[in-house]
Image (tube, rainbow, N blue to C red):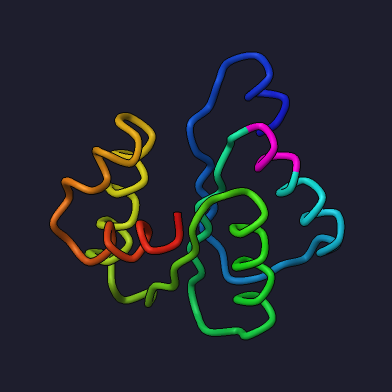
Amino acid sequence: CLDEHRQQRLRAVIFIGDAVEESVDELCALAGECGLRKLPLFLFQEGKDPDVARCFKRLCQLSGGAYATFDAASAAQLKALLRAVASFAAGGMDALRKLPDNAAKHLLEQL
């Protein structure tokens, strides 16, 4: 995403996952670089693995992004989170503030 961001400015990166297989230190370094380049990460965790949660939250903090969990059975919850990030990417914080749902509020609390 950093290479793409250098070529054409990205406003957000979304990752949806349930595990971390890469080196956490390397991921933190990359997330920190994203933060320096004003490229927030939005990481959505399926499941409740506490190690994954800790890693995802740290990556979001370093990048200036936001973290959320969702239940695999809740397509509506994931849809709301994705809509919130799309609004943020298109219109920034003002657009995100205009969304009335809890997903947007949850992301706003972290940004």
Residue 3: % across, % down: 72, 25
Q: Nearer the viewer, residue 54 or 92?
A: 92
Q: Which residue is pictured at 74% across the width and 47% down the height?
A: 32
The single residue placed furthest to the top in the displayed view is 7
Q: Is residue 3 above or below residue 20?
A: above
Which residues are the magenta region? Answer: 33-37
- Quadrant of res 57: bottom right
Locate the C terminus by quadrant. bottom left
39 lies above or below 14: above
Q: Residue at x 31, y 76 (%)?
A: 73
Q: Quadrant of the N terminus?
A: top right
Residue 48 at x, y = what percent? 53, 84
Total labels drawn: 0
Direction left: furthest residue:
100
The answer to whether 7 appears left or right of 89 in the picture is: right
- Find out whether residue 50 is within the magenta segment: no
Q: Residue at x 33, y 61 (%)?
A: 78
- Asked whether, in this view, residue 14 is left or right of residue 96, the answer is right
Give residue 52's quadrant in the image.
bottom right
The chief SS type of the magenta part is helix
Side of 54 relative to 67 (left or right): right
How far from the left and from the top, in percent, is residue 37? 66, 32
> Image point 49% across, 58% down: which residue?
66
Tell whether 52 sits left or right of 91.
right
Q: Residue 108: give x, y in percent of width and height.
A: 35, 57
